Amino acid sequence: MVPHLLGFHPRLSFVVIGAGGPRQRVDLGFRYDLPDPAGAEAAAEIADHAVAVLTQRGATTVIGIGYGPGRLVTPVADAFAVAARQRRLDLRELLRVEDGRYWSYLCANPACCPADGTVFDYPSHPAAAAMTVAGLAAYPDRDAVAATLAPPTGTAAQSMDQAIERACVRAQALIDRAQRTGRGTPLRLVISQGRRAVQVAIGVYRGGGRITDEDTFAWLAVSLVHLAVRDDAWARMVPEHRQAHLALWADIVRRADGPWLPAPASLLAFTAWQAGNGTLANIALDRALAADPGYSMALLLRDILAAGVPPAQARLPMTPEEVAESYAQAEAPAPPAPGRPGKRRTVPGKRRTAPGKRRTASGKRRPDGPPRRRADPGG
């Protein structure tokens, strides 16, 4: 079950599963990289953060599974057992998995838990087959999941670069046209046409279609740099269409790079969180923050994911109409000071988060303090 819950087969990892409610249904699962070299401080940090997330989510029954050699797994497993019992969580099982065998830290009966481990055949298990049929496939490892968002290379990359250049020329022409009128922000035509293009793209994917034209992808990527366009798109990410939205943003992320990447990657992360795919969300955030380490939408989402906030809380910050009104107010002239000419406010492209969400992720504390090794939620 674990590989399907995470979306890939974990390696050198400590996986935590939490269940709760009257039927003790699995509610969440998340993963940590095992500290190497192992150490008590690092192990305690992971354990404390894990039980804080479990407690916040209302889990009452928990399972811990370490994937790797005992020298790396055991310190984390021991610390997790202590922390779980201190929080009065029901630690149902605590395992170590390596080379097709598992060992229990809770069972000392050699009849059922032999010293050389218990062999298991994951691929032949009925649960694995059922989850694969249900669409919950498991990639070989996390790198294989990341490869699904890999940017183009070779001639494909050159072709996309040329399309981006054409999109930039188009944007500059719209800016020049807007400046000749002398009214409003010079970006207003880029923003209005960008919003329209994103809305059309969302409609195509919701209708079961896909975009294949490079120039369309390039214009979407260039338009989303403007936060008024990105936030309009964000406001349209309703959960009932999350699979269509995942396909759209993933298609753009695969073709974007550099300054064009953080916006669509952050939108992909948000919709992946909505869909309960924490692994894809974190991989998208890795891409966004590699391109711009200070991109605040990505930083905010990273803190949210690390805190174990459930997908049900992935609510839209504003409606598209409220987003448009917020930016319209920001573009309006500020009231003039007595005896001085009026001055326009800053163009809203300087904002780094959605309107009404002026929060910075840096400095925001996770439960019991932020661990240096972040969790990789799988649900």
Image: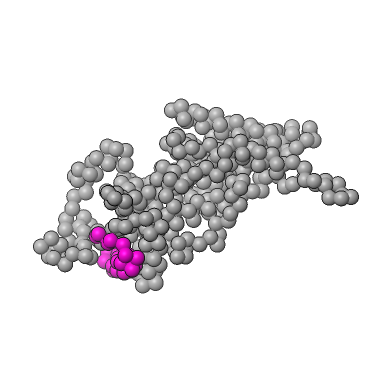
Residue 160 location, x and y as percent? 54, 37
Residue 59 in the image: state x and y as whole percent.
Answer: 34, 56
Kindly report the secondary structure that dominates the magenta region of the rendered protein. helix
Residue 262 lies left or right of residue 43; in this view the side is right
Left or right for 320, reference 366: right
* Membership of 65 in magenta stretch: no
Residue 86 lies in the magenta stretch: yes
Give residue 312's quadrant in the image: top left
Nearest the viewer among 255 and 365 is 365
- Is residue 12 at least partly visible in the picture? no
Q: Residue at x 55, y 49 (%)?
A: 297
Q: Nearer the viewer, residue 162 or 136?
A: 136
Residue 281 visible in the snapshot: yes
Residue at 18 percent across and 64 percent down: it is: 107
Give the farthest residue toward the right: 339
Residue 333 at x, y percent in the picture: 77, 42
Q: Is residue 149 above or below residue 43?
A: above
Nearest the eye: 152 or 74? 74
Q: How many marks?
A: 0
Residue 69 lies, in percent from the top left, at: 27, 64
The one of 155 and 233 positioned closer to us in this rendering: 233
Magenta span: 68-93
Q: Residue furthest left?
A: 111
In this picture the colour scheme is one colour
> Which residue is at a point 43% across and 46% down the rendered structure image?
311
Q: Residue at position x 47%, y 61% from top?
A: 366
Left or right: residue 350 compared with residue 162: right
Q: Residue furthest toward the bottom?
A: 40
